[in-house]
Amino acid sequence: MRWLINFLSSSLGQKIIMSLTGLFLISFLTVHLLGNLSLLSDDGGYTFNTYAYFMTHNPLIKATSYGLYFFIVLHAIQGLVIALKNRMARGANRYAVKAKGNASFSSKNMALLGTLVLAFLFIHMGDFWLRMKLDWLPTVVYEGYAEPIADLYGRVAMQFQNPLIVIAYVIGQIVLGLHLWHGFQSAFQSLGLNHPKYTPFIKGLGKAYSILVPAGFAIIPIVHFLFK
Ligand code: HEM
């Protein structure tokens, strides 16, 4: 057990935790986006509300959600610890400052971008998730459901009529994209998955992902504001 604690608190162990939690969060984002795209269908919210009901009542998905909250916290804390360590090391070694000069904007600002994503997440979860958990949302009655279910669609549609919220969501997605731009490929590198044949593919996939997924999220508030 001690070797595990030693390993997890070593620089390599910390990087591996960042990579694995990051990859889990990336897979969550993919599922979350695919589900959220049903917010665009013209059925008064039926598809989205029944999808959200399923996601929040299925025992397996509920259990995975607790893992998700834990990984978000772990990823954020570990990221800040690594950033502080790097800052202290740079203070002691002026050459490292120079070496960083060639890095991309994203890789130089991962801690700042991550903190901004976390701030977005707090506002976002307060707005939708927390209201649902506290039963603060109006409900709708659908045929085939034993109980009235939360009208999350109504809440989302109402919020996205506010231009300031739409702008905040779009900015949140730009920040998320920048965080993923470096984070996606860095997760594979830290796991030692480096290969002349596959690394260029992973880097390309990471770049495509960090544009397409945030763009997919950003489209939702824009379409709601302009057309719904
Ligand atoms: C237009 C964009 C988005 C919309 C409309 C949206 C909508 C929602 C809604 C309605 C919920 C509560 C219902 C549920 O748990 O599924 C939720 C939960 C959540 N959202 Fe989003 N979301 C968006 C983007 C994002 C982004 C970019 C992130 C991450 C950076 C994110 C992270 C989360 C998390 C962690 C939860 C809690 C999930 C759980 O309890 O399992 N969302 N979102």
Image (cartoon, rainbow, N blue to C red):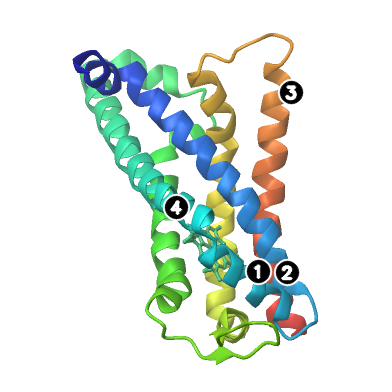
Is 6 placed above or below 218 here?
Answer: above
Is ligand 1 closer than 8 angstroms to the Cβ of mark 4? no
Mark pair 2, 1: CA separation: 9 Å
Q: Residue at x 73, y 69 (%)?
A: 38
The residue at 45%/37% (across/down) is 21
Vertical comparison of 18 with 170: above or below: above
| Callouts 2 and 1 close, C-beta under 8 Å | yes
Q: Which residue is mark 4?
A: 63
Asked whether the beta carbons under mark 3 and mark 1 sit within 8 Å of each other, the answer is no
Q: Is 168 left or right of 82, judged from the image as shown?
A: right
Which quadrant of the view contains residue 125? Answer: bottom left
Residue at the farthest top position: 196
Circle nearer the viewer, 4 or 1: 4
> Along the line of sight, which residue is nearer the eye, 182 or 76?
76
Residue 66: x %, y % from top left: 40, 52
Give SS at disc 1. helix
Disc 1 marks a residue whose amino acid type is: Tyr
Q: Earlier in the sequence, mark 2 or mark 1?
A: 2
* SS at badge 3: helix
Return the disc, 4 or 3, that comes first in the chain's sequence.
4
CA gap between label 4 and label 3 equals: 33 Å
Residue type, mark 2 in image:
Ser
Q: Amino acid at mark 4?
A: Ala
List x then y, in percent, for residue 9.
25, 23
Neighbour tally class for label 4: few under 14, some 14-19, many 20 plus, Cα within 10 Å? few
Q: Are marks 4 and 3 in contact (CB under 8 Å)?
A: no
For the residues labelled 4 and 1, the Cα–Cα distance comes to 17 Å
**Pointer 3: what residue?**
201
State the residue in front, 95 or 87. 87
Which residue was labeled with disc 1?
A: 51
> Which residue is identified by label 2?
38
